Image (spheres, grey):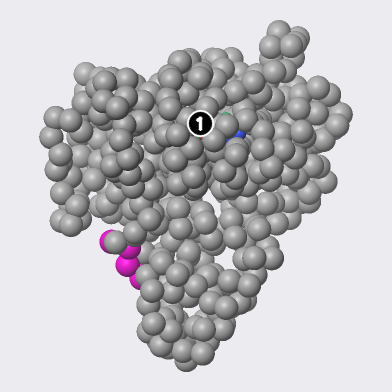
């Protein structure tokens, strides 16, 4: 099969499984650039970095699953940017950057200890390596309670919070503890929701639903990560609902994570939502300075690195966005100190931190903001920019106005004009309203941070 044809088949397949706006935004302009027959690796091109990261993080499993269904020889997918934005030449720095990249890659958690093939758990994610602070102590306590008393105490346990704040770590820690304590007596299974979706799609297509039912219903602790992706895909959601009920009725433990609380996943079926709300819902928030510092110290120690406390303090003070980013900076510091034998001075540290923490979103346009907001709330971008009075776009539009002001510093008249030819007072009102609500409603605050984070990653 020609590459073109193969990719068209894949897109046709995926189009049926994700929402139309998502498909148009993220995948319509993708291409299959190359297929390495020998290694079974397919290279997919996306129009920009944002799309690349987004597709990689949200659709990779779906893409791989679909490719494999069509061509069993395919083993993996790589993503790359074609038509890179000319403002950002792809290969500016030379050897040093390469050296650094390969070091950082070798430090990447993705390449660390092998995932357990039976449970799918990563042994790195334990309670021992999880630092507890005010941002996560309730979630942590709930997770420990669940590990102690599976199926009885809090069921389901629903953990939500922004990207890189430790949800996966925490829910896997429960799995690892249970698996270690009960050895073979208790079946634990961790699945990303993409994995779950893929399994169901595959089974429906191959008429093997019984296999999937057995796989997911024959366990004692089911951990499903990033449940927000399941919402809205009817067959999968239904299967999940049945699985959920079966396990629940047999007092099996269910643990779920999501980037937002159940009542904010717009596509989630009501009955599933109320099931979630019947259990224990906890959130993980943004870590404070003390927690960030403790995490840095723990990570440095775990990896056997000795780094000046002063440096760690500076990093903890300035890298605030999330823990993944904190780890990234730590790795770079280690690279300079240990591998290149260079003492980190203030200038170098500044350089590392500002490289990692992109606070100036130079290339973000108003359209990007609207698209990111629309995508987050799963509404059409057009509904945000026109005069639509649909109830479900009122808040997304206000958030878009707020972000245009906050991030791009656009004028109120300009913002009003862009979003539905509205008066500048509407824009002012929206910005004030969102600012005020953010200080009262951590959930809203978190949503906005998530959208920003996506935009910063462009
Ligand atoms: P999420 O699933 O919320 O996006 P992860 O669980 O993947 O976030 O966490 C991102 C990284 O940060 C992981 O490497 C994880 O080990 C680390 N991490 C997050 N929270 C903590 C914590 N409280 N203590 C130690 N490491 C943490
Ligand atoms: Mg996660």
Magenta stretch mostly in which secondary structure? loop
Magenta part of the chain: 363-367
Between 320 and 230, the one lying in front of the other is 320
Residue at the image point whose x is 45% and y is 70% from the top: 406
> Image height check: is 185 above or below 23?
above
Percent across and percent down for residue 294 are 57, 32
Say which quarter of the image contains residue 444: bottom right
Between 157 and 276, the one lying in front of the other is 157
Percent across and percent down for residue 330 are 41, 31
Residue 50 falls left or right of residue 393? left
Residue at the image point whose x is 54% and y is 15% from the top: 117
Which quadrant, please, contains the N terminus? top left
Residue 7 falls left or right of residue 393? left
Residue 221 falls left or right of residue 318? right
The answer to whether residue 35 is visible is yes
> Image height check: is 452 above or below 178?
below
Question: Helix, strand, or loop for circle 1?
Answer: helix
Say which quarter of the image contains residue 97: top left
Residue at the image point whose x is 48% and y is 58% from the top: 451
């Amino acid at each position: 099969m020609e590459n073109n044809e193969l990719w068209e088949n894949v897109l046709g397949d995926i189009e049926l499984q994700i929402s139309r706006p998502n498909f148009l935004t993220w995948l319509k302009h993708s291409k299959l650039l190359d297929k390495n027959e020998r290694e079974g690796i397919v290279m997919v091109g996306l129009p920009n970095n944002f799309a690349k990261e987004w597709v990689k993080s949200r659709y990779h499993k779906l893409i791989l699953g679909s490719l494999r269904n069509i061509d069993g020889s395919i083993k993996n997918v790589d993503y790359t940017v074609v038509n890179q934005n000319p403002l950002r030449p792809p290969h500016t720095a030379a050897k040093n950057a390469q050296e650094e990249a390969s070091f950082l890659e070798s430090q990447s958690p993705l390449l660390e200890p092998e995932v357990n093939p039976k449970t799918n758990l990563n042994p790195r994610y334990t309670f021992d390596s999880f630092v507890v602070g005010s941002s996560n102590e309730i979630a942590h306590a709930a997770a420990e309670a669940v590990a102690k008393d599976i199926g009885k105490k809090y069921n389901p346990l629903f953990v939500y919070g922004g990207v890189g704040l430790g949800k996966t770590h925490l829910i896997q820690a429960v799995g690892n503890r249970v698996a270690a304590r009960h050895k073979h007596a208790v079946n634990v299974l961790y699945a990303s929701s993409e994995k779950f979706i893929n399994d169901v799609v595959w089974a429906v297509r191959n008429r093997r639903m019984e296999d999937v039912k057995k796989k997911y219903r024959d366990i004692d602790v089911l951990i499903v990560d990033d449940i927000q992706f399941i919402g809205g895909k009817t067959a999968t959601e239904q299967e999940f609902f049945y699985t959920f009920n079966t396990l629940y009725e047999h007092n099996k433990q269910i643990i779920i994570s999501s980037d937002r609380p159940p009542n904010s996943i717009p596509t989630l079926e009501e009955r599933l939502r109320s099931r979630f709300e019947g259990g224990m819902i906890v959130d993980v928030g943004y870590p404070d300075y003390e927690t960030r510092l403790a995490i840095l110290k723990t990570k440095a120690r775990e990896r056997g690195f000795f780094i000046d406390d002063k440096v760690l303090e500076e990093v903890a003070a300035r890298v605030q966005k999330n823990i993944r980013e904190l780890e990234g900076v730590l790795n770079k510091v280690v690279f300079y100190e240990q591998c290149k034998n260079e003492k980190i001075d203030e200038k170098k540290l500044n350089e590392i931190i500002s490289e990692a923490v992109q606070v100036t979103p130079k290339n973000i346009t108003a359209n990007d903001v609207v698209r990111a907001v629309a995508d987050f709330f799963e509404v059409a971008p057009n509904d945000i920019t026109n005069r639509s009075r649909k109830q479900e776009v009122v808040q997304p539009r206000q958030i878009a106005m707020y972000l245009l002001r906050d991030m791009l510093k656009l004028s109120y008249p300009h913002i009003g004009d862009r979003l539905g030819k509205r008066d500048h007072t509407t824009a002012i009102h929206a910005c004030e309203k969102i600012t005020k609500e953010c200080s009262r409603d951590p959930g809203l605050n978190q949503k906005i941070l998530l959208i920003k984070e996506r935009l910063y990653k462009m």
